[in-house]
Amino acid sequence: MKAVWFAGALALAGAAVMAEQPAASPAPATEQVLAKAAKFPSGYLDHAALPDSIALLPAPPADDSTAFARDEEASKRGLALHGTARWDLATSDADLFTPKATEALSCAAGFEVSPETTPATARLLRRAMIDLGVSTGGAKNKYQRPRPFMENGQPTCTPSFENYLRKDGSYPSGHSAIGYGWGLIMAELVPGRATQLVARGRAFGDSRRVCNVHWLSDVEEGRIVATATVAELHSVPAFQDDLKAAQKEIAAGNLPAPTSDCAKEAEALAEG
């Protein structure tokens, strides 16, 4: 996998670029994207070990199907949240580049999840993020599904990325794969809060529907890719080692409370 290409894909809201993609057609990248790419660790999985999202998933819903009518209805519900606290949370969840991204799990975990407070845990999540995102690339590239804002003409929560998003397939959602995968991994690390963590990972992905950049079915199928990817990650010794280091870090205790307003986050999530 080429780190720059994946960084460009993350700029496109979690899209993935497969390792063998020809050099003539890399994901769009800006100087800012290139600078941030160098800060990402490599993933755990070789390309050949990545789950095959084409084999895992059905084709996206046809435009005249009941399933697509469901997608449209879910999109309308998301658009109705524009300007609410849930929209603000979705905007925050759109950030995958900065170290703050893992802080999205802090309230669900019951402690601050960041490179400063839990470096081993944050490294585990950020490295797994690469595999979770890239695993969606096969289906994305095959189907090249247009995103909701391209169909309805309504705003997104990340307007500066819209030009990139137009060039990147919507199905399945890389953000959803990453969020749900993070929730599964964190649930293993903090089993006493498994329900909260998996639910927050699910909501992290659903933030893309709220943001008007993914259909509901994109988000749902991202969870399938995440489940397969996390299962495959457990076969990798380096992942197992990092998982144990994170478990040791958390078991040591003395972890700071979340800096986020957890009551406000709960209220936002309750909005839809």
Image (cartoon, rainbow, N blue to C red):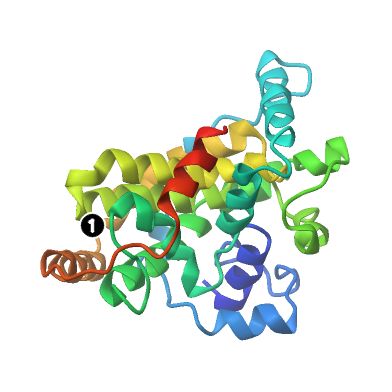
- Residue 202 in percent (x, y) is at 45, 41
Q: Secondary structure at mark 1?
A: loop
- Residue 102 in percent (x, y) is at 42, 64
Q: Is residue 100 above or below residue 70?
A: below
Lateral position of residue 91 relative to residue 108, left or right? right
Q: Is residue 228 above or below residue 260?
A: above
User: Which residue sits at x=68%, y=26%?
Assistant: 71
User: Which residue sits at x=72%, y=18%?
Assistant: 69
Q: Is residue 20 visible?
A: yes
| Residue nearest the observer in this picture, 118 or 22 | 118
Q: Is residue 143 above or below residue 48?
A: above
Lateral position of residue 262 relative to residue 190, left or right? right
| Residue nearest the observer in this picture, 95 or 214 | 95
- Residue 193 in percent (x, y) is at 24, 45
Dividing the image into 4 quarters, which one contains the C terminus? Answer: top right
User: Which residue sits at x=56%, y=55%?
Assistant: 93
Query: For mark 1, what is the residue?
Result: 235
Q: Is residue 47 visible?
A: no
User: Which residue sits at x=54%, y=85%?
Assistant: 38
